[in-house]
Every structure is written in C-alpha cells, then in structure tokens.
Amino acid sequence: MKALHTCVYLDNVEEAAKAALLMRMVGYRAVVVEKSSKYNEIADVFRDAGLNVYPRCTIRVRRAQEIPLRASEARRSGCRVVAVVPESEEAMRYSARDYRVDIIVFRPGFAKLLDSSQARLHRMGGGYVEIDLSPILSSDDFAALRSLSVAIRRAVAYNVPAIVASCVKSAWDIVAPKSLEALVTLLGVHPNHAKMLVYHAPWAMIREAVRKR
Amino acid sequence: MNDIILLVLLAILACLAAYSIHVSRRASETARLLLGRLSVIEKRVSRLESSMLAALESHEAVEKARILKKKRRRRYVATIILYDGRLPPDPRRLQDELRKAIVTLAGEVGYADARPAIVYYDPVRGVAIIRTNHLAINVVLAALPLIKRVGDTRVRVIPIRTCGTLRSAKRAIGVIEEVPSRAA
C-alpha cells in the first residue's frame, strides 16, 4: 500500500538522499517536508528518488487570535501544508475550526480534547490531528506511551480525523508504515482503523490541503 | 311521602357507597395480585437472562478453545538490515536485541507467543528473514523499530514484506529470481 509521510524535518542534503531511498523502499510515495533554508535541494533529492514532495510550515500558537494571521502568512510563503502546534486548549479548538490549518500537532495532555465536539470542529475546518509516535520509537520514551495510546483510541472512538506518523529528523528515524500500523493495532485499535490512520488519512489530508488552495 | 322518598334516596346512596368501596377493594386486591404475578415474571425473566448470559459465556469459552486448537500459521517477515560501520551485526546478537525489543513491548508472554527466529541472514546483502506466526505478526512488526543497536553498531531493521512462505520472502528480498508471469 502506498503511504505518505507527513513530517520530515531534514536540513541536510546527504541525510535527505539516504532518507529518500529508504522511504521509497519501505513504501512511501510522497513526503511532506518542513520548509527550511535548504528546502529546494532537499525537495529535488526526494523527487529524483521518485517521491512527491509537499512543503510544510509548522507554527507554534498560544492564543487563538494569532492563528488566522500566522496561518495565512504561512500559506502565502508557499507552504502547501500548514501545521499548528497548539500551546493552549483554546488554540487547539480554534485551529480545528480554521480552514487555513491542515494539521494540528497533538501534544500530551490534550487527549481529553479529542471528543465529539472536536470532531465537529474538524468537519468545519477540514484539518487533521497528527499523533507522532517518534517519542516511543526513536527515543524509547515509554512514559509517553499511555498518553499516545489514549489519544489514538479516543480519536478512533469519536471519529476525530487523525494521522499517525513518526517524525523523521535523520535517515535513522525512518519507520516502515507496516510497523506503524502494527503498533497502532497493538495499542487497541482495529486493524482497519489502523490502516486508515496510517495510509488513508495522510492522503486525504493532502487532497484537502491542495483543494483549499 | 317526603320521608319515604328521603329514605329511598338515602338507601340508594348507601348502596352506591357500599358498591364503590367494594369495587375499590376488589381493584386493590386485583392490583396486588397482578403486582405479585409481575414480580414472579420478573424473577423468571432475570433467571432466564442470567442463564442466557452463562450460555453465551460458555459458548465464547468453547469458541476460544476451538481457536486455540487451530494451527498457528507461519509468517515470514523479509527485512533489510541497515548498519553503521564496517562489519554487519552478528545474527545471534541481533536475535537477542529482537527478543529485548519484543519483551519491552509485549512482555515475556508476548515473546513466548511470537517465538521469533531469524531463519535467513545474508550479511553481504544486509537482509534477513524473521519467522513468526500469524497471531503475533503485529508484535514483531511493531518491535522492529525498537532495535537500535547491536553491541556498538547502530542498526536499523526495516520490514519490506510479510509472506506466508519462506520462498516468497526470499523472492521479496531478491535472493530468488522472480518467476516471470505468463501473458494470457
């Protein structure tokens, strides 16, 4: 199954070359790369490896009033995907509603906000919650396991549109989508929902993001 | 004449009052009888419900026992081994790291269930095939990213394909040539 990787934070062209080959081998067909000073070279490396590339901007927001302005600025600067890291509950709710935001990065402690009202807000705004499993997979920080598993289960239970990913900062951080799907299944989610979170939801997010432009 | 009429009226009233008292007593007795029968029916229904639940549980237990009887199908995970350094990792140490990763994720019971084994290892190509069973495949796939080091060597085990036979797993990693399909 073809997969799309939604968070690649690389700023080294050599690492990007290794990462591109590896991603192509494990089944990724497109990547969303964080915009940096070397974005164009990195994007060329991924395209040469046969992967589609979409630029992403991540903004940290504490107050809801900042979101429309900063998200619009990010879009104008050429980012196809706008991701918000909310630092307050108000920011998380508002960014779900805002059509300019494509991804809301899940933070531990906000699992209780993944409920039916959040799902309704996402239907208004069209964004997705990104649940990053790299704390468990890359750094063996199992303290985060409980909050991440609760978040995934709540997202499935309340139909909150969500993406499960493992963010990449170097070629060594790449995790095969099969392993992600297996881990999500082990956390208590039905295999069909796990496939949806890992494979289908990222493509749906990108289609929505491209349509919004 | 008026006294007679009054007496007749009083008699009628008295009869009516007696009749209404009789009717209300009969009604309350009937209500008490009906409540008694209702409580009996309620007890029978709750007994029926508990016996149905017990039957369902025993049916589930029988189903589970039947599943335990089923043979576990083997699964072969074709993987690529990436390593940092000149020498590839030792397969026995890699097996130990796999064991530690599965125990971290699913415990000793999960490891015993999965019983993973590296059945093919090619250090030159940097590929390996891990055997497990169909019920524990998710445990093995989820544990592979947790293998980060074998000794001092940084290592990454990346699953490429899960197959039902060793032959198809070898084909997936390019050890055996693919059989060309015949055009219709």
Image (tube, coloured by chain):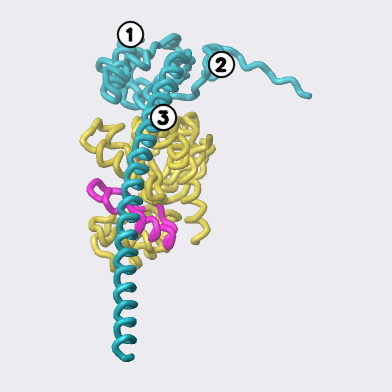
Q: Which mark is residue B92?
A: 1
Q: Which residue is mark 2?
A: B168
Instruction: Give the color of chain A as drawn.
Output: yellow
Q: Is residue A70 above or below residue B68?
A: below
Q: Earlier in the sequence, mark 1 or mark 2?
A: 1
**Secondary structure state at the residue bearing disc 3:** helix
> What type is the residue that disc 2 sits on?
Ser
Q: Chain of mark 3?
A: B
Q: Is residue B73 above or below residue A156?
A: above
Residue A7, image x, y percentages:
38, 44
The quarter of the picture where residue B171 lies is: top right
Asked if labels 3 and 2 touch by Cβ distance under 8 angstroms, the answer is: no
> What type is the residue that disc 1 sits on?
Arg
Q: Earlier in the sequence, mark 2 or mark 3?
A: 3
Give the distance between the C-alpha atoms of the residues marked 2 and 3, in whole angstroms. Answer: 42 Å
Q: Which mark is residue B56?
A: 3
**Given this view, does label 3 or label 1 mark the residue nearer the observer?**
3
**Residue range (magenta):** A104-128
Q: Is residue A48 above or below residue B108?
A: below
- In-image side of A152 versus B165 (left or right): left
**Given this view, does label 1 or label 2 mark the residue nearer the observer?**
2
User: Magenta segment: does it hold A127?
Assistant: yes
Q: Which mark is residue A43?
A: none
**Given this view, does label 2 or label 3 mark the residue nearer the observer?**
3
Residue A18, image x, y percentages:
42, 31
Instruction: Give the color of chain B as drawn.
Output: cyan
Residue A211, image x, y percentages:
52, 58
The structure residue drawn at horizontal position 74% and vertical position 20%, both measured from the top left corner, is B182
